[in-house]
Image: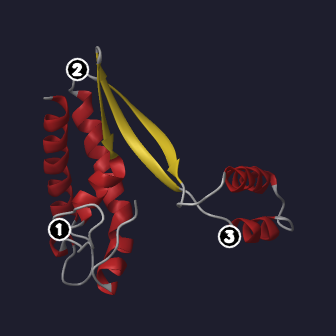
Amino acid sequence: MLPTFATDRDHALASHLMQPCLIRIIDNLRKATENLDWQSEYTQAQHWPEGTTDAQKQQVAELAAQLDQADADTAPDLEQALRQLPTPTPIYHLRLTQGDRVVTLDVWELCFRLCFVNYVPDQPVTVDAGLVEADGEIDWITLDEKAKTLITQALAEATA
């Protein structure tokens, strides 16, 4: 699920870019689906590390629920207990429905395709340097143009 980075620099740049990539993907999906004659809805699931038991999943759910209600004195202990357990990775999908046809787009994969050069799952990734200006700031125009192109292409393929 999570990419492996080709270099430490790619990891650092991805940390800087992933939130803006997610925002641009979601915004461009919203704009593009407004004009589709498909119904759309977002779904969320969790991907657990391999070997995670049902008991560990239940324990994480219980501790997270307790943490939501915890006071300032109790919260650090609950957070510490959670750090000792496997952590799920959220998975977001856009589900498009038209009659009996249902297609699903993986939002994180779209983000990875936006952020990385020639993204291939399970292969080390390199950040698209064109998304970052020489001073290290995000090139918002390039990011948005690439996101729009990617979403247009992904939706055309999915709904063809």
Q: Mark 1 against mark 2, which lies toward the viewer? A: 1
Numbered label tally: 3
Q: Position of residue 138 (x, y in %)?
A: 26, 71
* Residue type of the residue flagged with mark 2: Asp
Among the 4 quarters of the image, the one containing residue 6? bottom left
State which quadrant residue 22 falls in: bottom left
**Residue 84 location (% of width, % of height):** 70, 71
CA gap between label 1 and label 2 equals 32 Å
Q: Residue at x 34, y 85 (%)?
A: 8
Residue that badge 2 annotates: 37
User: Residue 153 at what x, y percent from top left?
Assistant: 13, 43
Q: Is residue 73 above or below residue 136?
A: above
Number of other residues with Cα within 10 Å of mark 1, as a class: few under 14, some 14 to 19, many 20 or more: some
Of mark 1 and mark 2, the one earlier in the sequence is 2
Instruction: State which tag comes first along the sequence, 1 or 3.
Output: 3
Q: Is residue 92 above or below residue 83?
A: above
The C terminus lies in quadrant: top left
Label number found at residue 117: 1
The answer to whether residue 126 is above or below residue 60 is below
Q: Which residue is mark 3?
A: 83
Residue at 25 percent across and 44 percent down: it is 28
> Mark 3, residues whose alpha carbon is within 10 Å: few (<14), some, or many (≥20)?
few
**As shown in the figure, which amino acid type bears the numbered disc 1?**
Val
Is label 1 in a helix, a strand or a loop?
loop
Q: Nearer the viewer, mark 2 or mark 3?
A: 3
Asked whether, in this view, residue 62 is left or right of residue 51, the answer is right
- As drawn, is 62 to the left or to the right of 118? right
Q: Secondary structure at mark 3?
A: helix
Give the quarter of the figure containing the N terminus: bottom left
Which residue is depicted at the point 33% across and 72% down? 14
